[in-house]
Image (cartoon, coloured by chain):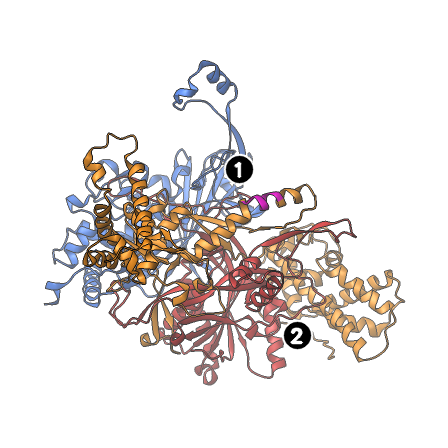
C-alpha cells in the first residue's frame, strides 16, 4: 500500500502510560518508539478489532509524547542503560547481560480510521471505541506494557472519536480542538527535507561531504567561534537556533537480500510468509507542539511499501511553515 | 503419524500473561488507610556514607604507611536512601496487575503441527485443572504481600487491598492481613480463605478468558515512623569513579519522582509459586524459571540432567507424549504464563 | 608457471607477513622445530586456506542483535544496494569497510588477505584471478587455484539463508488488508556493522580528537578558536557482547563493543514554567508571564503604536498576532492541568474567581462531592454545565489585554475593541464535551 490514507474519523487514545517500552529503536537510535513499531501496533490492533467483530479500518497513526522517563544513567556525557536483570544460567553462573534499553512513556495515539458500519449504525461508535481502547490496553507498545493510570476516570484519559467529515475548514477546526487537548506534548513529524538542505550548506564549504555527514550534522550541536558575533566582540555560537527540536529517527527498512520465498529461510517465524533481510533506514524528524500542526494529515504516519524497490517506509506529510509569532522549541 | 515426526518448533515464544506495573511508594498514617488524599509520595535522597577498608588489599597497598593513609582517608561513598518521614508510620505500596488470557497460545511458532499439539495439550490441562491451582498460588502471593520484598520483614502490620478495576473504578474489593498468610505454604488463614478464593477465581477467569482482568493492589505496611524503606536498586554496569555506589529506582523525574519497585521484581514475587522442584521442602517456593534458577542464591534447582527443567518436561509432554506428573504440568504451564523464547533452534 | 618480478614481490610480501607472525607467536618460547614448521611458507598457506572457512566477511552482523542468535550474517556492501535518499549502508562511499565474523582464532587469515601489494588487497587480486599472485602462492597451479578459491570464500553467502528466534523478525503489511496474512512480508532487520563503524568513527572524533578537545577547551574559556566542535547530546553507549566484544564481530571488537545510539528523545515539557495558580486573585497575572505571551503583547503594542495603514495587510497581520495570543490561553490552561491534581481549586489558597476555576480545573467536576463542602461542590458542577464561564474568562482576557496595551501607551480602547479581544480567546479545550461559547461573535 502506498496511497495516502483516506479516513473519516480520528480515533484518539490519549495519555497512554507505557512502561518499559524498548528504548532502542534501531541500531543507531534510542529514546523513542520507531514509527515502524507504531504501524506494526496499528496493524495488530486492526486484526484484533476485526476479530472482535468490529468494522474499523486503520489507515495511519499520529503520536504525541507528553512525558517520558528513559532508564539511563545520570552521567552528563555519554549515558548507559540501567539494566534490571542479572540472570543465572542452569549451572548457577551469571549469564552475560544483553543490554536492553527501556523507557516509560506518556503518549497519545491518534489513529486515522474509517468504518462503513458507523454510517448506518452511529450508535455503535461509543461501544466500539471502548472495545478498541480495551484491546489496546492488553497489547504491548514496542514491548512496553500499557499501565492503567492512577486516576483512569479523568477526562484526559478518555478515548475519543473525532469526526473528520465536512469541509476543510470544519476538519481543520475539529482537528485544532483535538490538538489543544493534546497539550502539553510534542508530536513527531518527518523532516526529510532538512537533510538536503543541510547537505547543500555543508557541500558549499566542502564538496566531499556526504548525506551521512549531513544527517549526523543534524543529529548534534555544532559549535563554532563567530568573531563577528556579540557586536564584534566574538562569541561561540551553535547551529540550533530556530532549527526546532530536530532529531535523527529510523523511518523504515531497506532490503539487503532478494525476497526469499515462504518456507525457504530456516527458523523464520512462519513458513507461509515471504522473508527478507533488511536494515534500518534513517532520516530526520522533528518534535513539534501539536497546536502548530494545521491538518490531521500533517500529524499522521502511514506505510509506503515498495517491495519491488526493496523499500518499506513510514511516511508523514508534515510541511514546515515558519510561524513568525512563535519561537521554535530549540534543541540545546 | 504427525506425532512420530513431531519436533519442537525452532521459533517458539510466549508473552507474559501476568503483567504488573511498577509499584509506587507512598507514606502516611496507618489510621489514614481509607483516605487516599492524605498520602505523600516517598522520595529518594542521597546520603554520604563512610565505607571502612575491609576489602582484601593488593600487595602493593600493604605498606603500613599507605594503609594508614588509606584508613585516614576513608572511602566516602554516595548512596541513595528512602525513608518514611517522621510523621508517617506506614508505607503504602501500589501497583496494577493485568491478567491476560490465551494461556498456551504462542505469540510466535513456526511449526503448525507443533502448535496444534501444544495448544491441544494446554487446553486438555486447562479443562482438567481449570488453572485453579496456579491462580490460587498467584492470589496467595498477592494476599501475603511477598511483592513487598524486604519491606515486609519486620513490619508490625501489613494490610493488602485488592480491587478489581472496571472502567477505571474499583468494582469488587478484598482485604487481607498479609502477615497471617503463610509465604511458605502459600495458604490463607481461615478467616480470609473465602476472599483468597474469590481473588483466585478472578485471576483464573482472566487467564482463561478472552477479556483481560485488571487488578489494583495496595499494600499498607506499618513499619514505624521515619523507618527506612526499600525500593528497587538499579543495576548499572561500568560505574565510573566517584559515581553513586547505590542508585535506587524512582518513577518520574525531578520533584515528581516517586520511589518504586520495578515491575519485573513484582512479577518475580507473584510467580514465586514453584514449590514442586527438588529441594522445595527446605527452600520454599521459588519464582517460576525454566531451570528453577534463583539469582540471589546463584543456583538453578531444576537441572536438565534430572529432567525436571522446563524444556525436558515440555518436550516429554508434547513430543514424546509422556505426560509429566501433575505438579510438573503445573510448572510447565506456569512457565508459559511467565513467557519467554523457548524454541529449539538447534 | 613463469615467475615474474611482480610475482616475487607478492611472494616476499607474503613471506614477510608469515615470518612476522612466527616471530610474534614464538617470541620468548622454547620454540621446538615443530612449532616453527607451522610457519613454513607452503604449510602456513595450506593451513590458512583451510581455516578461512572459519571466518566470513560481512557487512551486517546477526550476533549484534543478540549474542545467542545463530544464522545468516550478510555481505551487502554499498555497491550491492539501491541508492536511496534515506541514510543507510548505501550512504557509505569509499570509507566502507568489511567486518569479520566467525572464529576469532582465524582472524590472522583475514589480516593476510587484507595485506596490500601494489595498492590493493591480496583478496582483491585473487578475485581478479591475478596470475602473478597465483604463481607466488605455489608452483603447482592446481594447488594455487585451489587455495585462491578457498580464500575467495571469505566473502560468501549461505547456501540456505537462516534466521533465528533470537533475531528480530517483524511482519510488514505490503498489501492493504491487515487482517489478511497473505498481505504481509517478514522482515529481519540486521545490524549494519559497516554503517555503525562510520558513525562510531565520527563520534569518537567529535569526542576525543585533539582538534575537538582544543576547540571545546577554547569555548569553555571563552576564547576564540579557528575550528569548531560538535556535541552529540544524550548519546547512549550500548555494549554489544559484554566483556567479550570479539564474540560479536571483528569491528565490534575494534569499537570496544561500543554501539553509539543517537537520541531521538522528545523535548521535556518545561516544568520550570509551571504557572503558580494558587495564591493569586487572577490567572491572567500568571498568563502575562507565561512563555511567549509578553513578546506577543509587545509585538501587538508596537504594531498598533506604529499607526499602520488601514488596509487588508494591516488587518491580517494584526489578527495573526491576536490569534497567536488567543492560542496561548489553552496552552496555558493545559500547563495548569498537567501539573495540578484534579480538584486543586478546593485548596483554601485558591483565590481565583469561579470562572477561572472552572476553566483551569474542569476535572474537579468528576470528583465525588465532599460531605462537608456539599454546597460548594454541587455549585461548581452546576456552574460548569451552565457554561457562561467561558465568556467570562474571555472577558477577563479582553480586559487584561486592554490594560496591557494601555500601559504600553495605547489610548483607552472602547467596547468594540473589548469585544474583539474577547473573540480571540480560545477557551474551548475542555474535556470531553466542548462547550460552545454561547455569546459567540462570528468573525
Q: How far across and how far down the image is residue C104, in percent? A: 30, 46
Q: Give the secondary structure at mark 2.
A: loop
Question: For this rendering, which residue is in front, C377 or C344?
Answer: C344
Q: Colour of chain B?
A: blue
Q: How far across and how far down the image is residue C215, in percent? A: 63, 45
Magenta region: which residues? C209-214
Query: What predominant SS class does the magenta segment belong to?
Result: helix
Q: Are marks 2 and 1 on the same chain?
A: no
Q: Residue C436 carries which label?
A: 2
Chain depicted in red: A
Q: Which mark is residue C412?
A: none
Disc 2 chain ID: C
Q: Residue furthest top?
A: B64
Chain depicted in orange: C
Q: Name the residue under label 1.
A: B88
The residue located at (77%, 64%) in the rendering is C396
Q: For mark 1, does the 10 Å Cα neighbourhood hold few (<14), some (14 to 19), or many (20 or more) residues?
A: many
Magenta stretch containing residue A38, yes or no?
Answer: no
Q: How far across and how far down the image is residue A180, in percent? A: 62, 67
Left or right: residue B70 versus residue A328 is: left
Q: Give the secondary structure at mark 1.
A: loop
Is there any visible trace of residue C167 in the rendered image?
yes
Disc 1 chain ID: B
Amino acid at each position: 500500500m502506498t496511497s495516502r490514507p483516506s479516513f473519516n474519523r480520528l480515533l484518539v487514545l490519549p495519555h497512554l502510560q507505557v512502561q518499559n517500552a524498548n528504548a532502542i529503536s534501531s541500531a543507531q537510535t534510542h529514546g523513542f518508539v520507531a514509527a515502524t513499531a507504531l504501524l506494526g501496533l496499528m496493524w495488530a490492533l486492526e486484526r484484533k478489532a476485526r476479530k472482535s467483530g468490529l468494522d474499523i479500518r486503520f489507515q495511519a497513526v499520529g503520536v504525541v509524547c507528553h512525558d517520558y522517563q528513559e532508564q539511563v544513567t545520570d552521567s552528563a556525557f555519554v549515558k548507559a542503560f540501567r539494566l534490571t536483570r542479572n540472570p543465572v544460567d542452569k549451572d548457577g553462573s551469571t549469564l552475560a547481560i544483553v543490554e536492553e534499553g527501556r523507557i516509560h512513556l506518556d503518549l497519545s495515539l491518534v489513529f486515522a480510521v474509517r468504518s462503513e458500519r458507523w454510517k448506518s449504525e452511529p450508535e455503535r461508535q461509543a461501544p466500539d471505541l471502548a472495545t478498541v481502547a480495551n484491546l489496546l490496553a492488553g497489547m504491548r507498545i514496542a514491548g512496553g506494557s500499557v499501565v492503567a493510570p492512577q486516576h483512569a476516570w479523568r477526562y484526559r484519559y478518555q478515548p475519543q472519536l473525532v469526526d473528520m467529515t465536512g469541509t476543510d475548514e470544519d476538519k481543520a477546526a475539529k482537528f485544532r480542538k483535538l490538538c489543544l487537548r493534546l497539550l502539553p506534548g510534542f508530536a513527531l513529524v518527518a523532516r526529510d527535507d532538512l537533510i538536503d538542505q543541510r547537505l547543500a550548506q555543508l557541500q558549499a564549504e566542502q564538496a566531499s561531504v556526504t548525506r551521512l555527514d549531513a544527517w549526523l550534522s543534524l543529529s548534534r550541536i555544532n559549535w563554532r567561534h563567530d568573531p563577528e558575533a556579540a557586536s564584534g566582540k566574538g562569541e561561540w555560537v551553535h547551529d540550533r537556533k530556530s532549527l526546532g527540536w530536530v532529531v535523527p529517527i529510523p523511518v523504515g527498512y531497506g532490503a539487503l537480500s532478494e525476497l526469499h520465498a515462504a518456507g525457504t529461510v530456516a527458523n523464520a517465524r512462519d513458513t507461509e510468509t515471504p522473508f527478507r533481510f533488511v536494515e534500518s533506514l534513517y532520516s530526520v524528524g522533528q518534535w513539534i507542539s501539536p497546536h502548530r500542526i494545521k491538518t490531521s494529515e500533517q500529524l499522521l504516519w502511514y506505510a509506503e511499501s515498495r517491495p519491488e524497490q526493496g523499500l518499506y517506509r513510514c511516511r508523514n506529510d508534515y510541511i514546515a511553515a515558519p510561524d513568525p509569532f512563535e519561537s521554535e522549541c530549540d534543541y540545546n | 503419524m504427525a506425532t512420530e515426526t513431531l519436533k519442537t518448533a525452532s521459533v517458539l515464544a510466549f508473552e507474559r500473561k501476568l503483567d504488573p506495573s511498577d509499584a509506587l511508594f507512598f507514606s502516611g498514617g496507618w489510621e489514614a488507610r481509607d483516605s487516599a488524599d492524605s498520602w505523600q509520595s516517598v522520595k529518594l535522597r542521597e546520603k554520604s556514607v563512610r565505607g571502612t577498608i575491609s576489602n582484601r588489599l593488593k600487595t602493593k597497598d600493604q605498606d603500613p604507611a599507605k594503609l594508614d593513609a588509606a584508613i585516614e582517608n576513608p572511602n566516602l561513598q554516595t548512596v541513595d536512601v528512602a525513608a518514611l518521614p517522621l510523621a508517617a508510620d506506614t508505607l503504602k505500596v501500589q501497583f496494577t496487575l493485568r491478567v491476560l488470557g490465551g494461556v498456551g497460545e504462542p505469540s510466535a511458532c513456526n511449526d503448525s503441527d507443533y502448535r496444534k499439539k501444544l495448544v491441544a495439550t494446554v487446553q486438555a490441562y486447562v479443562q482438567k485443572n481449570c488453572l485453579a491451582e496456579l491462580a490460587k498460588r498467584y492470589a496467595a502471593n498477592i494476599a501475603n504481600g511477598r511483592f513487598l520484598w524486604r519491606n515486609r520483614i519486620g513490619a508490625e502490620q501489613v494490610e493488602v487491598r485488592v480491587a478489581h478495576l472496571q472502567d477505571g473504578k474499583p468494582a469488587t474489593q478484598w482485604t487481607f492481613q498479609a502477615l497471617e498468610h503463610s509465604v511458605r505454604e502459600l495458604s490463607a488463614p481461615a478467616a480470609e480463605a473465602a476472599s483468597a478464593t474469590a481473588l483466585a477465581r478472578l485471576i483464573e477467569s482472566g487467564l482463561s478468558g478472552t477479556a483481560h482482568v485488571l487488578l489494583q493492589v495496595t499494600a499498607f505496611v506499618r513499619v514505624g515512623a521515619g523507618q527506612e524503606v526499600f525500593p528497587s536498586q538499579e543495576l548499572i554496569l561500568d560505574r565510573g569513579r566517584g559515581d553513586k555506589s547505590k542508585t535506587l529506582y524512582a518513577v518520574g523525574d525531578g520533584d515528581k519522582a516517586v520511589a518504586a519497585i520495578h515491575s519485573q521484581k513484582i512479577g518475580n514475587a507473584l510467580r514465586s509459586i514453584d514449590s514442586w522442584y527438588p529441594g522445595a521442602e527446605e527452600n520454599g517456593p521459588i519464582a517460576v524459571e525454566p531451570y528453577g534458577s534463583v539469582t540471589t542464591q546463584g543456583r538453578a534447582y531444576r537441572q536438565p540432567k534430572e529432567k525436571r527443567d522446563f524444556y525436558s518436561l515440555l518436550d516429554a509432554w508434547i513430543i514424546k507424549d509422556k505426560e509429566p506428573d501433575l505438579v510438573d504440568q503445573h510448572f510447565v504451564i506456569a512457565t508459559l504464563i511467565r513467557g519467554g523464547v523457548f524454541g529449539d533452534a538447534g | 608457471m613463469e615467475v615474474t618480478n611482480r610475482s616475487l614481490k607478492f611472494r616476499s610480501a607474503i613471506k614477510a607477513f608469515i615470518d612476522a607472525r612466527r616471530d610474534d607467536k614464538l617470541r620468548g618460547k622454547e620454540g621446538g622445530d615443530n612449532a616453527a614448521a607451522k610457519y613454513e611458507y607452503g604449510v602456513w598457506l595450506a593451513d590458512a586456506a583451510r581455516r578461512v572457512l572459519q571466518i566470513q566477511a560481512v557487512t551486517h552482523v546477526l550476533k549484534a542483535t543478540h549474542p545467542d542468535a545463530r544464522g545468516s550474517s550478510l555481505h551487502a556492501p554499498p555497491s550491492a544496494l539501491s541508492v536511496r535518499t534515506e541514510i543507510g549502508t548505501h550512504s557509505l562511499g569509499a570509507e566502507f569497510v568489511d567486518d569479520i565474523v566467525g572464529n576469532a582464532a582465524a582472524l590472522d587469515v583475514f589480516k593476510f588477505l587484507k595485506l596490500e601489494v601494489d595498492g590493493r588487497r591480496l583478496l582483491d587480486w585473487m578475485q581478479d584471478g591475478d596470475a602473478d599472485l597465483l604463481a607466488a602462492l605455489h608452483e603447482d597451479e592446481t594447488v594455487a587455484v585451489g587455495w585462491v578459491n578457498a580464500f575467495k570464500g571469505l566473502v560468501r553467502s549461505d547456501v540456505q539463508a537462516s534466521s533465528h528466534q533470537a533475531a528480530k523478525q517483524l511482519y510488514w503489511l505490503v498489501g492493504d488488508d491487515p487482517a489478511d496474512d497473505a498481505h504481509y512480508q517478514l522482515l529481519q532487520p540486521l545490524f549494519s556493522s559497516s554503517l555503525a563503524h562510520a558513525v562510531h568513527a565520527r563520534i569518537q572524533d567529535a569526542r576525543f580528537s585533539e582538534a575537538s578537545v582544543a576547540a571545546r577547551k577554547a569555548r569553555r574559556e571563552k576564547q576564540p578558536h579557528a575550528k569548531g566542535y560538535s556535541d552529540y547530546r544524550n548519546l547512549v553507549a550500548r555494549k554489544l557482547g559484554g566483556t567479550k566484544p570479539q564474540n560479536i564481530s571483528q569491528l565490534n571488537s575494534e569499537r570496544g563493543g561500543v554501539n553509539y545510539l543517537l537520541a531521538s528523545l522528545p523535548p521535556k515539557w518545561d516544568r520550570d514554567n509551571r504557572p503558580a495558580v494558587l495564591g493569586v486573585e487572577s490567572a491572567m497575572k500568571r498568563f502575562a508571564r507565561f512563555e511567549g505571551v509578553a513578546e506577543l503583547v509587545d509585538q501587538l503594542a508596537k504594531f498598533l503604536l506604529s499607526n499602520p495603514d488601514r488596509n487588508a495587510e494591516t488587518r491580517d497581520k494584526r489578527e495573526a498576532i491576536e490569534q497567536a495570543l488567543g492560542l496561548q490561553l489553552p496552552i496555558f490552561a493545559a500547563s495548569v492541568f498537567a501539573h495540578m491534581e484534579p480538584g486543586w481549586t478546593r485548596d483554601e489558597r485558591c483565590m481565583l474567581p469561579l470562572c477561572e476555576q472552572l476553566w483551569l480545573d474542569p476535572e474537579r467536576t468528576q470528583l465525588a462531592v465532599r460531605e462537608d463542602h456539599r454546597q460548594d461542590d454541587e455549585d461548581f458542577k452546576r456552574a460548569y454545565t451552565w457554561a457562561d464561564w467561558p465568556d467570562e474568562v474571555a472577558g477577563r482576557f479582553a480586559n487584561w489585554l486592554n490594560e496591557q496595551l494601555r500601559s504600553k501607551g495605547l489610548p483607552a480602547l472602547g467596547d468594540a475593541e473589548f469585544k474583539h479581544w474577547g473573540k480571540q480567546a480560545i477557551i474551548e479545550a475542555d474535556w470531553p464535551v466542548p462547550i460552545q461559547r454561547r455569546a459567540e461573535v462570528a468573525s
